[in-house]
Image: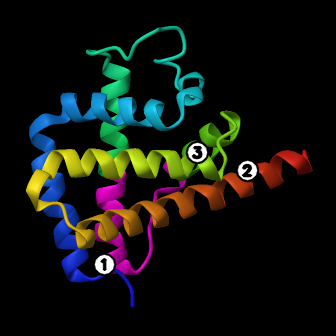
Amino acid sequence: MGFSEKQEALVKESWGIMKEDIPGLSLYLYIQILDIFPEAKGLFSFLKDTDEIPQNNPKLKFHAVKVFKMVCESAIQLREKGEVVISDSTLKSLGSVHLQKGIVDPHFEVVKEALLRTVEKAVGEKWSEDMKGAWSEAYDQLAATIKTQMNKEAAQTHLL
């Protein structure tokens, strides 16, 4: 069926709300990631050597905003093009970094769950199964694109 106009509107609407509290929601995203999978702490350079999640860490905020924006952009692309399109350089970078960090499928699921919890917290009473489905689909398509690139990177590494 593809990504519907309604799904795109739900993601855009919730992203508009989320933009009002990026610092708080960025922090919340990482609290959720570590709540679900405490071992993830070692995967993020800005969390490795600290006992708590740094409140005002610009790298944490930057990474969280990148996750939020890429999922939102994925929703728009799914509606307009029927697929997630990421520039070659960005995609290669994402594939390479995720491969180097040893990211595997369950890690993507952890971030997805944390993202959904974060969106739900941000939108409050506007949260619905439809909104959850829209964000889930956009995230899943983005993750699939990154995983495909990771597989390409891994294959190239094995050829060298």
Q: Is residue 119 left or right of residue 31?
A: left
Q: Which residue is mark 2?
A: 153
Tell me which secondary structure the magenta stretch mostly adopts.
Answer: helix
Q: Give residue 144's position: percent from left, percent from top.
A: 56, 63
Q: Nearer the viewer, mark 2 or mark 1?
A: 1
Disc 2 crowd rating (10 Å Cα; few below 14, some 14-19, many 20+) is some
Q: Residue at x 27, y 16 (%)?
A: 55
Residues at marks 2 and 3, CA–CA distance in whole angstroms: 18 Å
Nearest to the observer: residue 148 or residue 17? 17
Residue range in magenta is: 70-90
Q: Nearer the viewer, mark 1 or mark 3?
A: 3
Q: Residue at x 29, y 28 (%)?
A: 27
Q: Residue at x 31, y 60 (%)?
A: 73
Q: Report the amino acid beneath label 3.
A: His
Nearest to the observer: residue 148 or residue 105? 105
Q: Give residue 137's position: percent from left, percent from top.
A: 40, 69
Residues at marks 2 and 1, CA–CA distance in whole angstroms: 28 Å
**Disc nearer the start of the sequence (2/1):** 1
